Image (cartoon, rainbow, N blue to C red):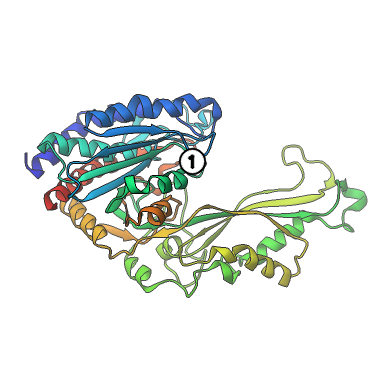
Amino acid sequence: MSRDAALADAAAYFDQGGFEKLLSDLVAIPSTSQEPAHRADVDRYLGATIQPWLKRLGFRVEIHPNPIEGFGPILTGFRIEDPKLPTILTYGHGDTVRGLAEQWDEGLSPWTLTKRGNLWYGRGTADNKGQHATVIAALETVLKARGELGFNVKLVLEMSEEMGSVGLREFVAAHAEELAADALIASDGPKMRPDVPTITTGSRGVFNFKLTMNERPGGVHSGNWGGMTTDPAIVLAHAIATITDRNGRIMVPEWLPVGGMPASVREALVGCEMQNEESATINPNWGEPGLTDAEKVYGWTSFIVLAMLSGKPDAPVNAVAPNAQAWCQLRYTVDADLTQFIPGLRRFLDANGYQNIAIEEGHMRMAASRTSPDNPWIKRAKASLERTLGKNVQIVPNGGGGLPGDVFIDHLHTPLVWIPLSYNGCKQHGPNEHVLATSAREGLLGYVGLWWDLGEAA
């Protein structure tokens, strides 16, 4: 069978409902790692669906306990056609966030695939069941077409990504020799725009911390004390207001990329245009002045206040609260020095008179990663996708969200070729998560062409 025939076969599979049926079966398993009551579903996702599927495709499959007790298992699959051939490692995660069923629109359920026009709703459709299912389905199409891939494939599918990929680093480190590969090619995260095929070569890191001001043991009467005793909520709000200006420009120098944004990142983002989504709109005046929207997301640090608390919002009382807290987050690139995030903030708060604001629980939730945009594997993937789809493919030096790419760079030294199939408005992690059917179809064809071309070149 020719390349064109394989692509036609994939298109027919999608158009005739084959991929819809596959994704429906995967979504139906409530494999959320964030609720202990669904641990059996987490195990079932691998044992009842992925493992038998991969075995049918000639993979040697193993399901391993997580190195960290209490977290989800990790599946590995190996299809080695010839040790002399190039080896591709692919990755995905079958766990999801909580279903949040009560928050979905009427007629929608997190564990039922529901089609409404071009939108296919269901938990995991975008993050990440739909994406790793596309990768495997494309491998199956190429195998059906010519009986072999022409390269070796290794697969890692974890079940604790939504808990911060707990145990993945330890697992990959312990199995580094077995998982050795020439490149990682996988799908996770959103494209820069729904209509623009995208390759990301890494991801921003995630660093969390909490700001706290404790003023007194308990609340005091707002009438008898209001106006002459310190309100910690007001003090904390002012402290946060010094961290950025009113338009979100970060004022803590230690949080920013050391030496500024690299020229290679700027060059890769030339012409990269972001767009508004239903879920959010772009404020051109927000963030670092002088940067494009794409540079702000893909090449710079952002500061976010995730939550704030003072008093009892669900039952306010007439009292000056005893304390105030803010849970905060930095999204940063590999160019920033995370070892200076907390010391730099401490110096900044002290210099601005906020010695009474404590910084607590500072920790890296996910490390930043980046492969050079001019890496040969990225160029190969870009050329193949453009050949198949007839569109320009945008290279993004590192996606805005967090991915465990650093694990594979650190222990396997593989370049990262992330090919995201979702989009920013997919509502992952919230109610009404969905995937665009057009993007899913395009992704399937893109991967069939890519797997075909890699085997042909090898």
Q: Is residue 282 above or below residue 316?
A: below
Label 1, residues with CA under 10 Å away: few <14, some 14-19, many ≥20: some
Kindly indicate the quadrant of the structure image that contains residue 120. top left
Mark yes or no: residue 106 visible: yes
| Residue under the image location 59 percent in, 64 percent down | 341
| Residue under the image location 45 percent in, 25 percent down | 41
Mark yes or no: residue 247 visible: no
Kindly indicate the quadrant of the structure image that contains residue 132. top left
| Residue under the image location 35 percent in, 51 percent down | 191
x and y percentages locating residue 414 in the rendered image: 33, 55
Disc 1 marks which residue? 162
Kindly indicate the quadrant of the structure image that contains residue 252. bottom right
Q: Residue farthest to the bottom?
A: 259
Nearest the viewer among 260 and 269 is: 260
Q: Say which quadrant the N terminus sits in.
A: top left
x and y percentages locating residue 36 in the rendered image: 55, 29
x and y percentages locating residue 438 in the rendered image: 27, 41
Q: Amino acid at mark 1?
A: Glu
x and y percentages locating residue 323 in the rendered image: 78, 50
Q: Residue farthest to the left?
A: 1
Nearest the viewer among 252 and 229 is: 252
Q: Is residue 325 above or below residue 141?
A: below
